[in-house]
């Protein structure tokens, strides 16, 4: 009998434990498990209301009842019926210590208070104010940096699917040229050859330049380096291993010599070389003629050249971290520079972080959150003693390339300022905050 | 001795039963918590995936996409490409085959004479989208795009007398009061044979909706009759929210013209005789047609323009043999708008409208799988613009890796 009583006690204790546990484990409501992203909904709603600058107009006409009435009608019509909102406009002034001071000007709402809500904001400029934003020109030690964009007509692109190198070159030109004193479109591989010999094309400074290769995974190779009769053939072709990896090694050496920053916009850097003239009979194993596959030997060779190491025919590898995200700092700079690529990208050719120790590199700017042991998109600077000498910006993204990422990477690394001439004008800015909440179903 | 044994036996049985019971109870609590954790993850993925779709310029007009994205590559933020969307397999009705092109077309219609017919061979289907998004075997989704504004139009005037139309503009939440409505009326004369039934001078105007989002328009100098029909298009807008409505009277006769979109890269539309769809007929009448292209400018004004290139007007015949080939119209450019086709002959007449660019007629679309029978479906919503027309993009996402249902 005693055992039965003891067991019943145990059962009671188990039951008590279950009841106690259940009372402590409060499962969240379905709405909090799967919440509607009110922050993004508010943001896209503000964006829509301002699609033709009507929100901007209303934000500066808070005494105009018609304008405010229309704004409320449009807001109510565009949101689901179970949504409550509060839209408030703040005047943006500057405090005596220089900090922004926000004072509420007007507000519209369809609820007394918004429990469990989320908000987004939008900064509006008065239509009476014309902003003149002057970009700072990128320089090194006070000397303007030249931007070279490889727009070689005698080359082909690879992993530039949907674009031609030329169209990418035009786009990146429009994005970046305001930040440079001199931007040079390198029209063909002959001009590139001239550049590799340290000769300027238009009297610009060759040292400290940035070179953007718009051919994707392929690198333009001048005939001098790719043709047997070329003057620099031995610096372009490795006869022993039948590979143009030597050319990539030479590029690395020159990049280091002139303190260039070489930009690879997509995929595996230096995987091919391209010249539709001298390599017209060669194809990249995928049927694209005018191109020769160097494989991963090209990347190793370039980095060896960059680090002044002796050339060796060595393979390299990249990682596939998959979906990667822009860092919060880069996202913030997206607003500053007005460039908005998707914050999530897919990386399938990320360089291993180990190259920093192997080739004496330092990461000066990383576009994406770290995905150790790989770095999906970063600017590497080569350390020569205490100084930087040569740089490499590799975006190991999957195709299709988003050229805005390349522009963003450069801007985030140099961080040139944009001087807004009337930015401090009193009353020229208003902050619109839209707060949304859901009624019912909670 | 036997009492002790019975006591022992009972206690063992009770203990064993209790342990089993409580293992089940605790297990249930734990599994519910794990399910909630997974569902939260699905909800987070839903928002990320929706932004990925809407902010990635992926599906080009030409060629096979290597990423699934809908953003207009020439614009920023949540502005979608009207042509990328046309390549999504979002058929709402049964597919239509057309023997003369030997193609099967995905179908979106809003009325028996307003079509969006696109060849399956050039479409992106659901399984391809899953692969491009990298979620094949992990998640299923349904993406729906619905116009924010519903602009309904009806003819209120009798069969004779000046034309009167009533308009109603409502949003997803409330009616759109005080909205401006820009409209365009295209009259079509049908009393003579081609090419004399060309459209005559169009009429444009602006009207404001009242407090319940309604408005009425009367054309005192236009009275439709059996020899005079029309097409009517209206843009309603208020503070950035824009919607589109359209109306055409019911056609006369059983024979009409069916516009089939060719692959977008060809920039052309094939006009078919309705009696040839799906199988070629030999008894139908020739239909004479005339085309007009309508586009909206930046300031909401509606403009009418003619298609200057091949076959802007002509005739569509049915049957086989030389001279009965399908008619191909070149669309001249990738400027979104509405293709209006007036046709007439032998008691068959009317107007057919087709969007050139997904949003031009305010069509809705649902792309992807069905969320039915999936335990937990996360949803997220964004406001987007497609060629200036306001839409709401809603993504439903569910996990396909085992059963996940709670709450």
Image (cartoon, rainbow, N blue to C red):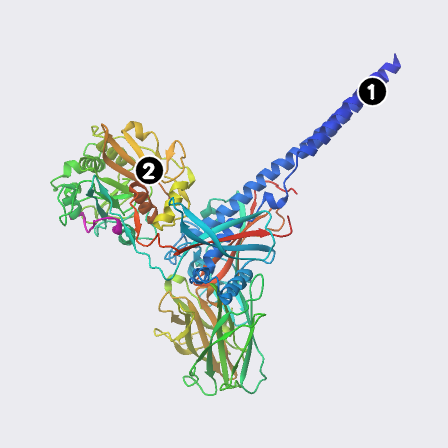
Of the 4 image quadrants, the one containing the N terminus of chain A is top right
Chain letter of mark 2 equals A
Q: Mark 1 touching mark 2, by CB under 8 A?
A: no
Q: Nearer the viewer, residue A49 or B300?
A: A49
Chain letter of mark 1 equals A
Q: Residues within 10 Å of mark 1 (few under 14, many from 20)?
A: few
Q: Secondary structure at mark 2?
A: strand
**Do circles 1 and 2 both sit on a common chain?**
yes
Q: Is residue A71 magenta?
A: no
**Residue A167, position as x, y percentages in the image:** 29, 54
Residue B253 appearing in the image: no
User: Which residues, given as a range, are shown in magenta?
Assistant: A177-190
Q: Is residue B140 left or right of residue A126?
A: right
The structure residue drawn at horizontal position 45% and vertical position 87%, both measured from the top left corner, is B192
| Residue B131 vertical placement versus B256 (above, below) | above
Residue under label 2, please give it: A365
Residue under label 1, please give it: A5
**Residue B242, position as x, y percentages in the image:** 48, 65
Residue B368 appearing in the image: yes
Q: Secondary structure at mark 1?
A: helix
Q: Is residue A6 left or right of residue B217?
A: right
**Residue A131, position as x, y percentages in the image:** 33, 56
Instruction: Find the distance from the CA under tag 1 to the CA under tag 2.
Output: 70 Å
Q: Nearer the viewer, residue A264 or A368?
A: A368
Q: Is residue A179 magenta?
A: yes
Image-quadrant location for residue B356: bottom left
**Residue A118, position as x, y percentages in the image:** 54, 48
Which residue is at the far front?
A96
Q: How many marks?
A: 2
| Residue B147 vertical placement versus A184 (above, below) | below
Q: Nearer the viewer, residue B387 or A231?
A: B387
């Amino acid at each position: 009998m005693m055992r039965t009583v003891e067991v019943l006690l145990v059962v009671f204790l188990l039951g008590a434990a279950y009841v106690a546990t259940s009372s402590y484990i409060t499962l969240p409501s379905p709405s909090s498990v799967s919440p509607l992203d009110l922050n993004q909904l508010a943001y896209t709603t503000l964006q829509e209301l301002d699609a033709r600058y009507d929100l901007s107009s209303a934000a500066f006409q808070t005494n105009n009842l018609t304008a405010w009435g229309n704004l409320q009608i449009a807001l109510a019509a565009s949101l689901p019926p179970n949504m409550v909102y509060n839209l408030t406009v703040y005047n943006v002034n500057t405090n005596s210590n220089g900090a922004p001071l926000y004072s509420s000007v007007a507000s519209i709402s369809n609820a007394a208070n918004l429990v469990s809500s989320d908000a987004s904001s939008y900064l509006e400029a008065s239509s009476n104010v014309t902003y003149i934003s002057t970009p700072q020109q990128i320089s090194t030690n006070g000397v303007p940096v030249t931007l070279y964009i490889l727009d070689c007509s005698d080359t082909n692109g690879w992993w530039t699917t949907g674009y031609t190198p030329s169209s990418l070159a035009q786009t990146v030109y429009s994005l970046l040229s305001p930040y440079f004193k001199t931007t040079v479109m390198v029209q063909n591989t002959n001009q590139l050859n001239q550049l590799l010999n340290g000769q300027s094309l238009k009297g610009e400074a060759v040292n400290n330049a940035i070179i953007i290769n718009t051919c994707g995974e392929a690198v333009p190779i001048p005939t001098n380096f790719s043709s047997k009769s070329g003057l620099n053939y031995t610096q372009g072709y490795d006869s022993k291993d039948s590979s143009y990896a030597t050319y990539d090694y030479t590029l690395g050496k020159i990049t280091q010599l002139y303190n260039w920053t070489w930009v690879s916009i997509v995929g595996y850097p230096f995987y091919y070389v391209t010249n539709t003239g001298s390599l017209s009979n060669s194809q990249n194993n995928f049927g694209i003629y005018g191109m020769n596959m160097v494989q991963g030997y090209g990347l190793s060779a370039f980095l060896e050249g960059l680090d002044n190491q002796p050339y060796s025919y060595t393979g390299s590898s990249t990682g596939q971290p998959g979906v990667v995200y822009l860092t919060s700092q880069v996202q913030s700079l997206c607003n500053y520079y007005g460039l908005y690529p998707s914050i999530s990208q897919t990386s399938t050719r990320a360089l291993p972080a180990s190259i920093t120790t192997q080739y004496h590199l330092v990461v000066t700017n990383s576009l994406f959150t770290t995905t150790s042991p790989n770095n999906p998109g970063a600017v590497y600077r080569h350390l020569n003693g205490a100084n930087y000498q040569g740089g490499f910006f590799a975006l190991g993204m999957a195709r299709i390339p988003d050229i805005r990422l390349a522009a963003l990477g450069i801007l985030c690394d140099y961080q040139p300022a944009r001087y807004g001439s009337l930015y401090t004008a009193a009353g020229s800015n208003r902050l619109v905050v839209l707060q949304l909440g859901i009624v019912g179903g909670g | 001795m036997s009492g002790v044994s019975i006591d022992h036996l009972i206690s063992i049985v009770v203990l064993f039963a209790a342990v089993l019971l409580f293992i089940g109870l605790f297990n249930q609590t734990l599994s519910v918590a794990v399910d909630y954790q997974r569902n939260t993850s699905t909800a987070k993925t839903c928002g990320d995936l929706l932004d990925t779709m809407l902010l990635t310029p992926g599906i080009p007009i030409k060629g096979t996409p290597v990423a699934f994205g809908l953003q207009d590559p020439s614009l920023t933020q949540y502005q979608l490409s009207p042509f990328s969307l046309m390549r999504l397999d979002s058929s709402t009705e049964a597919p239509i085959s057309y023997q003369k092109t030997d193609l099967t077309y995905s179908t979106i219609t809003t009325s028996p004479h307003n079509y969006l017919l696109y060849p399956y061979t050039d479409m992106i289907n659901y399984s391809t989208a899953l692969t491009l998004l990298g979620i094949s075997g992990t998640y299923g989704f349904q993406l729906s795009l619905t116009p924010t504004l519903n602009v309904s139009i009806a003819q209120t005037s009798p069969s004779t007398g000046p034309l009167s139309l009533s308009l109603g503009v409502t949003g997803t939440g409330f009616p759109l009061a005080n909205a401006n409505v820009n409209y365009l009326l295209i009259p079509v004369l049908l009393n003579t044979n081609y090419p004399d039934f060309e459209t005559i001078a169009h009429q444009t105007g602006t009207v404001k909706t009242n407090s319940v989002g309604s408005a009425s328009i009367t054309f005192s100098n236009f009275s439709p009759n059996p020899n005079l029909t029309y097409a009517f298009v209206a843009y309603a807008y208020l503070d950035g929210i824009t919607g589109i409505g359209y109306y055409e009277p019911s056609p006369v006769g059983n024979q009409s013209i069916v516009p089939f979109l060719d692959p977008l890269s060809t920039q052309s539309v094939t006009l078919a005789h309705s009696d040839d769809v799906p199988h070629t007929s030999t008894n139908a009448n020739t239909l004479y047609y005339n085309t007009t292209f309508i586009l909206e400018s930046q300031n909401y004004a509606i403009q009418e323009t003619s298609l200057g290139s091949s076959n802007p007007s002509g005739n569509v015949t049915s049957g086989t043999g030389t001279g009965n080939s399908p008619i191909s119209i070149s669309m001249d450019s990738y400027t979104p708008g509405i293709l209006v086709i007036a046709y007439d002959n032998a008691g068959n007449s009317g107007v057919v409208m087709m969007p050139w660019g997904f949003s031009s007629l305010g069509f809705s679309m649902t792309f992807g799988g069905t969320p039915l029978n999936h335990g937990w479906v996360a949803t997220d919503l964004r406001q987007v613009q497609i060629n200036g027309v306001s839409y709401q993009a809603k993504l439903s996402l569910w996990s396909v890796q085992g059963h996940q249902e709670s709450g």
